[in-house]
Image (tube, rainbow, N blue to C red):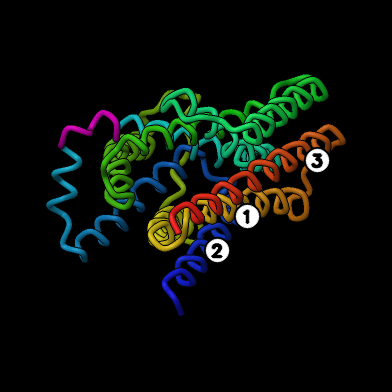
């Protein structure tokens, strides 16, 4: 099997894992969102430290964690934890349709963020795609009488995470390990306060981990569900061109959408249908533009 094929199939595993993750987190619906988020953080750290130890890179880990990029790593950790928390909450309360829409919007929002933060240029096709996506959000807001805040929050938080990561001269595995290490003291502190029942009454809930064997195993597995796809994404990104990776990432929200409608039976209104159709059209235009641009660059470099 060629290196490109290995990267391609690794990316398929990544997208399928992310796309079907609502099924996993739905099994944790009875666990408080912050407890799930805390365990996801702590067990991810255990996994990443194990990988870095096996690679003999713990010294690099300490150097990056306490180095000059700490503030940027801390901001990345903050926005990705917000993204994780909103996604887990959306699964818990039955808004997976909205979460899938957020991850459809993200690639188009990334184009705008590239323009705002890095001065990247929009070609005509990209501008049309972004305009159609914006109109879809406006249509959905008007039809439902409320803005799709879950979708927009997921798209913006992941977009800010991408912008921050773009400015970090640190490899993906090392940077994510540092991010969860920064979040780990907060996660551990929350769990200890929750265990000691020292939280305010509105937040006082019994600790699930250790009380139920099945859900304890799921909470521990959340670290693997988080860390393994990120490692495989890093593997794939070194072997497959970015235009292909970008197109493959649409498999994630597509599977989320199918989980929401076909498995969870979430409400999918006519307004949702029109908005999704517009988003899919925008992504088709954007994807075609990306493919044509990639082919043009290959011809120039030939």
Q: Are marks 2 and 3 in contact (CB under 8 Å)?
A: no
Q: CA distance from mark 2 to mark 3?
A: 28 Å
Which label was assigned to residue 267?
3
Secondary structure under tag 1 reads: helix
Front position among marks 2 and 3: 2
Secondary structure under tag 2 reads: helix
Span colored in magenta:
67-73
Image quadrant in which you'd find residue 66: top left
Front position among marks 1 and 3: 1
Secondary structure under tag 3 reads: loop
- Residue behind mark 1: 251
Q: Is the residue marked by circle 2 packed among few (<14), some (14-19), or many (20+) residues within 10 Å?
A: many
Image quadrant in which you'd find residue 67: top left
Q: Residue at x 51, y 29 (%)?
A: 121
Front position in the image: 232 or 180: 232
Q: Compare marks 2 and 1 and give the one earlier in the sequence.
A: 2
Q: Compare marks 1 and 3 and give the one earlier in the sequence.
A: 1
Q: Are marks 2 and 1 in contact (CB under 8 Å)?
A: yes
Residue 212 seen by the camera = no
Query: In the figure, 139 relative to 111: above or below?
Result: above
Q: Residue at x 80, y 36 (%)?
A: 272
Q: CA distance from mark 2 to mark 1?
A: 8 Å
Question: Residue 290's spot in the image, x, y percent?
Answer: 58, 46
- Residue behind mark 2: 12
Q: Is the residue marked by circle 3 packed among few (<14), some (14-19), or many (20+) residues within 10 Å?
A: few
């Amino acid at each position: 099997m060629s290196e490109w094929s290995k990267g391609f199939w690794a990316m398929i595993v990544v997208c399928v894992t992310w796309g079907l993750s609502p099924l996993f987190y739905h099994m944790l619906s009875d666990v408080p969102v912050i407890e799930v988020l805390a365990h996801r953080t702590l067990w991810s750290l255990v996994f990443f430290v194990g990988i870095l130890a096996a690679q003999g890179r713990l010294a690099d880990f300490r150097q990056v964690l306490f180095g000059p990029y700490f503030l940027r790593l801390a901001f990345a950790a903050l926005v990705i934890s917000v993204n994780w928390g909103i996604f887990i909450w959306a699964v818990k309360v039955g808004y997976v349709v909205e979460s899938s829409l957020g991850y459809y919007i993200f690639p188009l929002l990334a184009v705008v963020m590239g323009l705002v933060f890095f001065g990247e240029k929009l070609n005509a096709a990209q501008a049309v795609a972004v305009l159609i996506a914006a109109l879809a959000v406006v249509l959905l807001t008007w039809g439902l009488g409320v803005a799709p805040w879950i979708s927009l929050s997921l798209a913006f938080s992941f977009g800010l995470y991408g912008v921050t990561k773009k400015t970090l001269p640190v490899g993906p595995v090392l940077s994510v390990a540092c991010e969860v290490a920064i979040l780990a003291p907060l996660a551990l502190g929350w769990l200890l306060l929750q265990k000691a029942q020292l939280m305010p009454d509105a937040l006082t809930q019994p600790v699930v981990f250790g009380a139920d064997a099945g859900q304890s195993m799921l909470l521990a597995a959340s670290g693997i569900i988080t860390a393994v796809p990120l490692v495989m994404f890093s593997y794939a990104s070194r072997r497959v061109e970015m235009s292909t990776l970008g197109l493959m990432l649409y498999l994630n929200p597509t599977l989320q959408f199918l989980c929401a409608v076909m498995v969870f039976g979430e409400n999918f209104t006519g307004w949702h249908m029109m908005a999704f159709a517009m988003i899919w059209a925008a992504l088709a235009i954007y994807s075609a533009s990306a493919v044509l641009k990639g082919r043009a660059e290959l011809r120039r470099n030939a």
